[in-house]
Amino acid sequence: MVKLIMPLILAFLLHGTLLISASSAAVTLDAAYRAALANNENSGIQDEVVLQAEERYQQAKGTLFPTINGVVTYQKQQAPSVPVATSPSSQTIAKITAAQPIFHGMREYSALRQQGDQSEAAKLSREQALVSLFVDVATVYYQVLMSDQDLKDLKRESAVNSERLAELNRFRKLGRSRESDVLLLQSNVAILDAAIEAGEAAILNARTSFHLITGLDSNSVLTDQFNFPSHLAPKEEYLAKAEKRSDLLGLQKNLDAADEGVWVAKGQHIPYIDLLADYYFDRPTYLQSIHWDVQLALTIPIFQGGVIHSQTKQAVSVRKQAELGLSLAKRQAQRDVENFYQQAQSDFNQIQKEKTAAALSQKTYEAEVRDFRYGLVTNLDVLQSLTTAQETMRAYDRVQYQFKTDYIKLLGATGVRP
C-alpha cells in the first residue's frame, strides 16, 4: 500500500512545486510589454482605425469599376381621355442597367491615391502608438524596480544605523559617548523608519500602475534583462533617426492625401463622361421588341451654387493644416530628442561620478569608525560619514534606473521600439 501511495504523494508535491515556480516566474520588460499590448484598448482601437482606412481605399477603388443593378418599375397613370395605344394606363419595366465611368476629370484616381495615403498613415500611426506604449510600460517597469531598490537601501541604512546605535550604547555605558550622541542617532533611525513607510507607499503606487497598464499581478517579480549601452551615440544620430519616425512619416502621408484632396475638389469643374447600358426583360407597348440600349453621356458642370468652389477652398485649407501639423510635429520630435538626450547623457555622467562617490564615502565611513574606536574623532563625525555613505549609495542606485528610463524615452523619441 505504501508503495502505491508514495509515488502519488511525490507526484502531488512535484506538481505543486511546478505551479509555485510558474506563478513566481520573473517578468521581463519584454513580457510586460506583450502583456500590456494584450491589455491595452488603444491598440485594438488603432487596429480598427487601420481596418477602416483599408476599407475606404477599397471603396475608392470600387468607383473605377462598372455598377450593375436590376431594376423593376410598375407605373399606374390616369387613362387618357382619348385612348392611345402607346400610352397605357399601367406599364411594367424590368431591366438590368450598367454604368461605367469613362472620364471624371481624373479625380477618381486622385481619390484612390488619397485613400491609399490615408491607409498608410493609419498604419504608421499605429506603429508609433506601439512605441509610445513600450515607453509607458518601461517607465512604470523601472519605477517599480527603482522603488524596490530604494526601499532596500533605506532598510539597509536603517539596519546600519541600528547597529551603530547598539555600539554607541555600549560606549555610553563605558562613558566614551555622550547621551546627545545616542539621541541624535535614535532620531536618525526614527527618520529612516518614516522614510521606509513612505518608500513602501511609493512601491504600492508604482505596482498599482504596473498592474493597470499590463494587467499582470501587482506583486510580480520583475527582472531587468534589457541591455543598455556603455555610452551614448552622438546626438546627430538620434536626430537623424527621429526624422524617420513613424508618426512623422504618417503625417507626411496625410499631407500627400490632402494634396490629392485638392485635386479631387478641383476635378469637379471638369466635364465627365459615362457609358450607360440597359438590357430589358419587360417593356410596355411597341418597345417590347427592343431589348437593349447603350448611351454615352457627357455631363458639363455649369453652376452648382458655389459648392464646388467652396469645397476646393476647404481642401486647400485642409492641406495647409496638414502642412503646419507636419512642421510642428518635426520641431516637437527634434525638441524631444534633444531634451531626452541631454537628460540621458547627464544621467550617464552622473552614474560614473556617483559610483566613485559611493566607493569613497564608504571607505570614509569605515575609516571614521576605526578612528572613533581609538578616540580620534567624535560620534558626530562618524554619523555624518555614515549618512553621506548611505545617501550616496541611494543616489547611485536611483540614477541607474533613471538613466534606463530616460534612455528608453530617448529611443521612443526617435521612433525606435527596442
Image: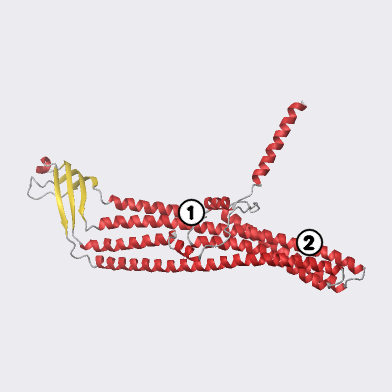
Q: Where does the image place residue 287, in percent across and percent down from the top left?
A: 11, 43
Q: Does dot 1 land on a helix, a strand or a loop?
A: helix
Q: Are marks 1 and 2 in contact (CB under 8 Å)?
A: no
Mark nearest the camera among 1 and 2 is 2
Q: Residues within 10 Å of mark 1 (few under 14, many from 20)?
A: some
* Label of residue 43 in the image: 1
Residue 417 visible? The answer is yes
Q: Is residue 232 left or right of residue 316?
A: right
Q: Is residue 412 left or right of residue 115?
A: right
Residue 395 visible? The answer is no
Q: Where does the image place residue 367, in percent across and percent down from the top left?
A: 80, 67
Determine the image quadrant of residue 111. bottom left
* Label of residue 159 in the image: 2
Q: Amino acid at mark 1?
A: Ser
The answer to whether 6 is drawn above or below residue 299 in the figure is above
Q: Where does the image place residue 136, in percent across and percent down from the top left?
A: 55, 59
Q: How many discs appear?
A: 2
Residue drawn at 19 percent across, 65 percent down = 303
Q: Where does the image place residue 397, in percent across and percent down from the top left?
A: 67, 62
Q: Does dot 2 land on a helix, a strand or a loop?
A: helix
Which mark is first along the chain, 2 or 1?
1
Q: Amino acid at mark 2?
A: Ala
